[in-house]
Image (spheres, rainbow, N blue to C red):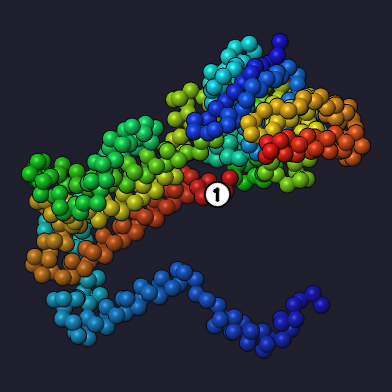
Amino acid sequence: MSLLQVDNLTVHYPGQSLPALQQVSLSLAPDELLVALGPSGCGKSTLLNVLAGFIAPSHGTAQFAGQPITGPGAERAVVFQHDGLLPWLDVAGNVAFGLKLQGVPAAKRAAIVADTLQQVGLADASDKRVWQLSGGMRQRVGIARALASQSRVLLMDEPFGALDAFTREQMQQLLLQVWRQSQRGIFLITHDIEEALFLASSLVLMSPGPGRIVQYLRPTFSQRFLAGESVRAIKSDPEFITLREQLLASLSRAQQQEAA
Amino acid sequence: MSQPAEHTLPAVDAISHHRRLTRRPLAAWQWSSLSLASLLLLWWALSASELVPALFLPTPGAVLGKLHTLTSQGYMDATLQQHLLASLQRMLLALLAAVGIGVPLGILIGVFPLLRHWLDPLIEFYRPLPPLAYLPLIVIWFGIGEFSKVLLIFLAILAPVLIATSHGVASVHNVRQQAALSLGASRGQLLRYVILPGALPDILTGIRIGLGAGWSTLVAAELIAATRGLGFMVQSAAQFLGTDIVVLGIIVIALVAFALELGLRHLQRTLTPWHGKAL
């Protein structure tokens, strides 16, 4: 059974002529890394907000494990681009936050936090304050917090969008390793074509006006990376470049149609 | 040779050192001390030369002498320490009440916009009023006891605390709230672990502003049939033309206000070190 299931989802914001999302359908299997790729205005953030339970569908359904999504919940942890961390807690406190909310005893919390920090490469930073960290380290904390909370799916809202190119690539590799180790479903939105191709085990290309899915793909580059191939070899592979250009072409085609 | 060149030439070193001293701009605290010192000097010059009679402006020495008399023998049946204590007690009571009522009410206003629409006109009506304007009403309603004095100071502290708290609660990052909700926070947990700590910097700022407002209301509050307190001391000394006591009282009131401000700023830095940091 799929973890997330979206059928004919339409979201219409009050006061806007076009729906933000129109007739969108997709599903996420428990071991999938699904990426929604598209320019701003394509409705990918709206889609994530529906899955997180922050906004309700106008038409159609969004389900988690067969149950309709009616609000935010601990089984669907969100990783934000900015500001998601709590500055009055240290790194360990932030990572433990979800467990604390769920009433997990302190000793067990500490063990899980230590484990998770190890996993994201922050074992030495557990007592640092959030505002002392670089952007990349903050995103590691955000990912660790979502992992530690025993969520079953991670919803990632352009998590690496604010990072420099070098850090972004490091974080992409980290995310793939975390994905394999943690055995969790991940839904990630981005406007970065390379990022989408490299990370996705399943990819939907979205287009604005109204926001909709224009193409489904199943890239295999993440499997190749996890099988040991290097990032640079993958991203400079002609196959990777061809797909990247095709995606770019269909995006601009979709935008020309919108303009026409 | 590993030493810098200027150390091998003492004469040149001395000159450049001298230049550096004369050219270096003064630090902020140095300017402030200079300003205070010149004020003291002007005071001393005007009073010691008897250009201004002692009735209007006593010499710094006379005021210092009065400090000794007031701390040992007292004035109006109480020493300076007892007057200070009486004022501080009123402030503390008013502060505790204002924080105890203002912070929870401010949180409610921040969480429920409807309550804000209801209470905003009331707060905005009384907040800009000078305390002396509604003092007579308070005396008519509540008499001349200790309660009226504390109430007046309380009202002065309440408005800034209330406004800052509700603003702080309403402006806690939406993303942080969403993050907590998606980690399974209940509404109570959201309030306790996200909204309250997120509003703390604003709450502390409100308390700081409120303390300033409350302290400046002190003299008005102690107009009401007081027998002790710094405000009372200054007023009754004025009736007997005890200018030295008036000046001394003013200085003590100013110093206490300064100490309160510094204390609150220190508290803010300790409790909310993240405040103002980019995140």
Q: Residue at x 23, y 64 (%)?
A: B250
Quadrant position of the N terminus of chain B in the picture: bottom right
Q: x, y percentage for residue B241? A: 10, 70
Q: Which residue is mark 1?
A: B277
Q: Residue at x 13, y 61 (%)?
A: B235
Q: Say what amino acid the circle numbered 1 marks.
A: Lys
> Is the residue A7 above or below the residue A11 in the image?
above
As rendered, which of B163 and A121 lies closer to the eye?
B163
Whether residue A114 is visible to the viewer of this picture, yes or no, is no
Question: In the visual, does B165 lie left or right of A251?
Answer: left
> Is the residue B185 above or below the residue B34 in the image?
above
> Is the residue A110 above or below the residue A169 in the image?
above
Name the chain under label 1.
Answer: B
Q: x, y percentage for residue B92? A: 27, 45
Q: x, y percentage for residue B129? A: 21, 51
Q: Residue at x 87, y 38 (%)?
A: A241
> Is the residue A77 above or below the residue B136 in the image?
above
Q: x, y percentage for residue A228? A: 89, 30
Q: Residue at x 11, y 61 (%)?
A: B236
Quadrant position of the C terminus of chain B in the picture: top right
As rendered, which of B24 and A176 lies closer to the eye?
A176
